[in-house]
Structure formats: structure tokens, C-alpha cells
Amino acid sequence: MSMSGGEGGPSAEQVFEVFTAYAQNEVRERQARRRVVAFLAGETLADFICENVVLAALVRGLANTEVTVIHAAEEPERAFIAGCNPYVEETMAVGSGEPFTALLDWFDAGMDAPVRCPEAAWAGRGLGAPDLLLVPGALGASPAHLAGLAEAPPTFRLPKGADDPSALIARGVGPEAWFAGIHGLDVETQCGLERAVQEQGGVVIPLDDAPLADRATVLTHARFVVGTDAALAAMASAFRVPSVFLGPAERRWPVWNREDILVGSRSLGPGDFGTLVGQLVASTAGCTGWRSPAEEVGVVPVDGIVPPPPVREAPLCQVWPV
């Protein structure tokens, strides 16, 4: 029995058919492409890098997934960092005081929802109904303590066209020469490391005074990187350049790969420089010139993410001296 709507309106059967077609289309779209929206709010650049690495580790096993990162635009370096994350398709930077609100979610299910998302930029990108929404609390784990990350770490890549080697060439360091990047060191530590590196046949390149994008371009070619700047230490680790961090691990360890080293003190003794550099040279024996980009480590595909992510008690990076 067919039911007709009043005053020539659609019948119940017609309404049912429309809603069925709408639901089927929604299912097809979500099966074809899953959308992940991640809101990153790290207090420091090092925190923001770590959030990007954890995000990459969580989503890289998901097939047919599009990831959008939303972050504050207070520091321009954040856009560059997100641009180095190969698992992020697009970003939205929200400046303080701007007449725009980055919505975490918008509950407007159905094709005839009573209220629609008022932000055209948000709705136009299809962000009103994400399949997965990740907020800072879900990405707050230290990469060093996230189970499985150090075994198959995600690898940052420089944005297209950003790998400009002119800064190294200008310093007289050609592709055939290997070098160690250093950052945030006092004069005594820098001199000690320079002597140790020169004894091994390399040179030292300071990474302190330049925009983050320029420093990242240099450090990606380094044989290894040593210093006290947590953001640069984490950046090197994200590119899978052996990274040595001199200083205490506070909220997050800024290094996490097996070849990375955490030195609990900001100062090294006179006898430590040769030992540390010798260990780094031995562990990077295949790198005799500029470093090539690290190969991506494959991961087992997953169907979804179950929060919170599992963590390990003891990181796999080295704590020095043992």
C-alpha cells in the first residue's frame, strides 16, 4: 500500500528510496576513501614534530586514507614540518585573531540535517564528517615509547623543490665529503666534536643560524647530527638521520630510532668526544659522502586504529654512555 504526502508531497516510499540511495552513496564514498582529521597543538616545535611522527605511525598502515592536519599558524615553521610529513595530504593553518574557527567536528548526519556547518572553508573540504578525528591527547605519546614505531619508523621527506644543496656547496662541502651537523653547543663541546670528527675524516657544519627549512635541507645530508636543540634533534630523527641529543628527556624523548642516542648531560668530558664520534662513524660505515634519503620501511596493513596506541616501557634508541 502506497502512502502519499499531503498537498502533492513525496510518498513514504519515495522518501525511503531517496534516503536509501543517499546511504548507499555514503557507504561507497567512505569505502573508496577514508578521511582522517588530526588537530595538532604541540607547545613547542619539538612537540609538534613528535605529534606528526606519531600521526604518521598511526595512519600509514591504513589503505585509501586522506589525512588533513589542522594547526595554529603562530610559527611558520609548523607548516613546513607538516609539509615534510608524507602521510599528510593537506593542512589548515589557523591564525590567532582571525575570523575563522577550526571545528573539531560537526554533527549534521543526513542529507536534510536541520543545521549545516557554517564554515564554508571547512564544509567545502569535506571535513564535516571525518571517519576518524584525532585530537592532541590521542597523539601525545612519545615516538620513542610508541610500540612498533622504532622497528618501522615513518620517514619525513623534504617538500618538492626544497632540497637545495647550494648552502653546502657554498661551504665547500661537496657531495663526496661527509659531515656532521651540530646545533646548540657551547664552545668547548663544539671544539671537542670538531677535533673528533676531523680525526675521522669529516667536517662539522653548524645548524644554528638559518630558517628551519634551510637547516632541514642541510641535516638530511649529514652523516649524523649532534646537539641540544630538541626541535633539530627530533627533525633529524624524523628524517632518519642518526641523531644525538645532549640533554635530559623531559615530556618527550626527542629521538627514537635504534641508531639515535640520548646523552643525559649537556656536557661531554674530554675523553668522551672521540668515543662518541667513533661509535657514530662505525654505525654509519656506509655513509662516506652526503647521506641519501632513507628507504621507507614497510608496515603491515591495518583496518583501523584502536586508541590509545600501545606503548613500550623501554625505548629502542640508545642511552649513552651505556
Image (cartoon, grey):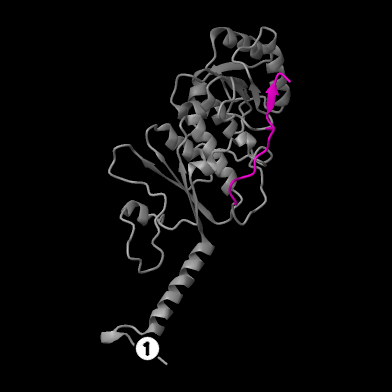
The stretch of residues the image draws in magenta is 306-322
Residue 14's image quarter?
A: bottom left
Q: Residue at x 61, y 57 (%)?
A: 303
**Residue 59 appears anywhere in the view:** yes
Is label 1 in a helix, a strand or a loop? Answer: loop
Residue 27 counted in the magenta span: no
Residue 315's image quarter?
A: top right
Q: Residue at x 30, y 55 (%)?
A: 118
Answer above or below: position of 88 versus 203.
below
- Residue 131 placement (x, y as % from top left): 50, 57
Report which residue position mark 1 lands on: 3
Residue type at mark 1?
Answer: Met
Q: Nearer the viewer, residue 138 or 322?
A: 138
- Residue 233 placement (x, y as % from top left): 56, 26
Q: Nearer the viewer, residue 218 or 48?
A: 48
Q: Nearer the viewer, residue 39 or 66?
A: 39
